[in-house]
Amino acid sequence: MIRVHNLTKNYGNLRAVDNISFELEKGDVLGFLGPNGAGKTTTMRIITGYMPPTKGSVRIEDVDIFDHPLKAKKQIGYLPENPPLYNDMNVEEYLDFVADIKMVPSKEKKGRILYVMDKCGITSVSKRIIAHLSKGYKQRVGIAQALINNPSVLVLDEPTNGLDPVQIIEIRELIKSLAGERTIILSTHILPEVTMICSRVIIINEGRIALEESLESLSLNLKSSESLYLKLRRNGDDVKEKIESIENISKVNMSAPGEYVIVPSNGSDVREELTSMAVKYNWGLLELRPLIHTLEEVFLKVISSEG
Amino acid sequence: MNSIYPILKREFKSYFASPLAYIIIVVFQGISAWFFFLYLKGFLHIQLDPGFQLQRGELNLNNLVLAPYFGTITLVLLIIIPLITMRLLADERKSYTAELLFTSPIKLRTIILGKYLAAVILLIIMLTLSSINVFVLMVHGNPDIGAIMSGYIGLFLLGASFLAIGLFASSLTDNQLIAAVISFGVLLVLWLVGAMSPVDGSILGYISVINHFEPFGKGIIGIKDLVYYGSLIYLGLFLAHTALESERWR
Ligand SMILES: Nc1ncnc2c1ncn2[C@@H]1O[C@H](COP(=O)(O)OP(=O)(O)OP(=O)(O)O)[C@@H](O)[C@H]1O
Ligand SMILES: [Mg+2]
């Protein structure tokens, strides 16, 4: 469980995070989206107790991270934006060290190390010096490190950054499988990732929450606004009028000469009527396809309407 | 406080993961042995010269070998200790591991103390190795064992203070070289203020790191000097703590 209340962070004159609040329960996976410099990393650093906020509070499993940092930090696993690795250690030594400072009981330590190495696919490099690992393997060691204390709250700053496609899928599966008993926040620039693993999404822009929604309601919204794209060879003055005359059409926009975006009224399918009309008036139908709003488009819309 | 051990262990091992620690130990050992035998040779020369017979009382082992030897070691420490401390905290930033340490359920002071103690152990190793030189004296005469002991206690305290100041310098930057230069600069100033103080008992004279060392070389362990070095160590660690804490509050 994470409760973030009115979080604000100023770096000198720059307000990196501006009055952000949200609450997550066990089982939630929150996707944290936003353009570069939006304040994602800053928010995550505050949540994990790395730095204090200028204003506001954070509670981890009902423990305030700044009043009782040691108690709260025991519950957290954190993958920073850059994996925090000691280059001169080998993978196993490193995980052993992290287990020690995360207060993993010595009886469980060996088992946890083997478990996270297996989960993150780094067993084969366990004796390699970290400095010699490839970027993707370093990232995996970073994820392994975040899981070592079996945390109930996981904060992952761009977890799939630098991984190959196969590993990306594996790590997504891993995150999904970890979800049930935990509360997870992850930031990412890969928008489909959010649709795949998150149950909720927050888009932040210039330090403020621009959109907060559960993924179900988000995808409902995306569907309902499904519109059509129509491209004609021969454009005429009356085309727009004629299309508007079709039943169940709520809006027609000409985006370029001969190109139209048609918004049908809720849920109705007007493709058949459109094709026969195009044939009838000999408009020269070149293209007709649904314009599905992707998360990308929502993202861009939200971000640009903010500025 | 349990977690001080993993911090210390990692830090100490990482000294020996690169050639730096070995080079530092060899150079330190080499220079101190070189100068030791230089002073010893001078001493033996004088002893054989009948012209000096009259002043034999003054020209003993302590004054001609031990005192200059300790003096040389203090100077070598001044140069070498910034190299030992430079990466202690600066490197944690560079490798982003500061974020791991500061989000772990350990206190900042445990981190600082663990790192400091790792460096102190390296210092102890260096001083212990260099004490082999002094055993040679046992063969050539009967040196003042008390003065040797107190001299080494003094060297340890002086070195430990330098380490604390170096650790503070390392807390200010993510650049090892800058950390080394800052600590060398601060140590040099603390060293030179002694020479600038005209009268004994002035403030500047009290601040001087080297003025407080002299009694140890003569076999005197004074409370005032212990307090001085103790305070310097505390101050260095305290300032490092403050620097790291305040950085994140900005
Ligand atoms: N230590 C710092 N000192 C001053 N300004 C900072 C600091 N860290 C971040 N900022 C600024 O705060 C703002 C938010 O940065 P943050 O790193 O949180 O963004 P982000 O959403 O994680 O971006 P990205 O997607 O690029 O990782 C940026 O304008 C950044 O320049
Ligand atoms: Mg970021």
Image (cartoon, coloured by chain):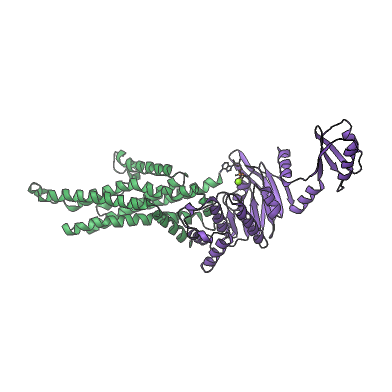
Chain colours: A purple, B green
Q: Quadrant of ligand 1?
A: top right
Residue A190 appears in the picture as rendered: yes
Residue found farthest to the bottom: A107
Residue B197 image position (x, y, % from top left): 31, 39
Report the number of discs. Answer: 0
Q: Nearer the viewer, residue A144 or A66?
A: A144
Residue B235 in the image: x percent, y percent?
42, 49
Q: Locate the C terminus of chain B and report the quarter of the image it occupies.
A: top right
Q: Residue A149: which quarter of the image?
A: bottom right
- Seen as rendered, the residue at the extreme left is B50
Rendering coords of residue B164 (x, y %) = 40, 50
Where's residue A221, x and y in %? 79, 48
Quadrant for residue A210, please give it: top right
- Would residue A98 be visible to someone looking at this image? no
A176 relative to B175 in the view: left or right: right
Residue at the far top in the pictured view: A237
